[in-house]
Image: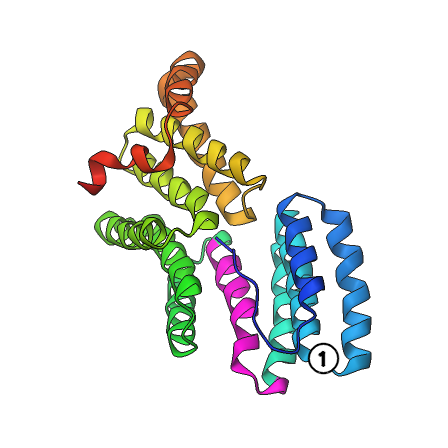
Amino acid sequence: MDLLVCDGEATDMGFSDDVRAAFRRGETDAVVRMSETEIDRARAAGDPAGEVEARYSLARVAIRGGDLPGGEARAREALAVALRSGDRRLEERPRHVLAAVARMSGDLTRARDLYRESIALNEALDQPMIVNSETHNLGFCELGLGNLDAARKLFATSRARVFRNGWADFVPYVCVAGAALASAEGDHSRAAGMVAVADGAFAALGQVPDPDDAADLAAVRAAAVEALGPAGFAEEYARGRRLDPRSAFDDEDR
C-alpha cells in the first residue's frame, strides 16, 4: 500500500498531487512525462524534494510494469538525492519502494526488516498515517512468511486506525488485507467476497490498486476460483459486492 504524499516543504505540491492522481488513474504515460519534466525542473532549481518525488514516481511506474530491478534502481536514485539533502523526510518514499520491491521479489525477511525500519523512521517523523500504511505492508510480510497470528494482529491494528480516524483512502487496502488473510486461512468463500469488497472500495474512490496490492488481489482471486470453481466464485463475489467495507468486518471486529 502506498498512499501518502511526501510533505517535504520544497516540493512542488501541484506536481506531487497531479502525478499521484495520474498514477492512481492508471495513466502511466502521463506519469512518465510529468516526472521526467519535473526532474529537469527540480535539478535546475536545486529542489531535492521535487526530484525525489519525480524519481519515486518513475520507480512506481516501473514496478507497475513488472520491472522490479528498474523500480529498485529508480528508488535508489531517489534515496541518494534524499540523503544528500540531509532532510530525513525525503527518505520516506524511496525507502518504502525498496521495501516493496523486496516483498514483491519474494525476499520477505529483508522486506520485513525494511518495513520495520520504515515504521521507526515515520514514528520519528510523527507521520501516523504512513506508520499505518507500513504496518499494513508489514502484515503482508508476516502473512507470506506463514506467521498468520502476527499478520492478523497487524491487519487488525491497521484496520482499527483506518475506521477510527476516517482515513478513506486506506479503506480499499484494509479490504485487500482481509481477502489475503482469508485466502491464507483457506476460507476461499470469504476471500472471494472480500475481493469484491476491495474492488468496490477502489471503484468508489476512482482508483486502481498499487502494484503490490494488485498482485495480492490477483493471487487471492486465482486461488478462490480454483477452490470454488468459476460459478462458486461468482456467487460469493456477487454477495461481497452487496457489502460495505465496515460491515464486511463486523464479525472480526466485535
Question: Would residue 67 be seen by someone viewing this image from the given angle?
Answer: no
Residue 253, located in which quarter of the rendered image? top left
Amino acid carrying mark 1 in the image: Asp
x%, y% of residue 144? 36, 49
Task: Please state, as top left, top right, bottom left or bottom right, where the C terminus lies in the image.
Answer: top left
Residue 173, located in which quarter of the rendered image? top left
Magenta span: 84-103
Provide the secondary structure element on which disc 1 rests: loop
> Is residue 101 located in the magenta-colored stretch of the structure?
yes
Residue 109, located in which quarter of the rendered image? bottom left
Q: Is residue 116 left or right of 91 when viewed as pictured?
A: left
Find disc 1 in the rendering and name its residue.
47
**Mark 1, other Cα within 10 Å: few <14 / some 14–19 / many ≥20:** some
x%, y% of residue 113? 38, 68
The correct choice, above or below, for 233 with respect to 172 in the image is above
Q: Which residue is found at the position 35% from the left and 31% from the top?
A: 191
Looking at the picture, tell me which residue is in the foreground, 148 or 110. Answer: 148
Looking at the picture, tell me which residue is in the foreground, 49 or 150. Answer: 49
Looking at the picture, tell me which residue is in the foreground, 38 or 99. Answer: 38
x%, y% of residue 204? 52, 36
Looking at the picture, tell me which residue is in the foreground, 243 or 131. Answer: 243
Magenta segment, prevailing SS (helix, strand or loop):
helix
Q: Is residue 14 left or right of 177 when viewed as pictured?
A: right
Q: Which residue is found at the position 38% from the left and 54% from the top?
A: 136
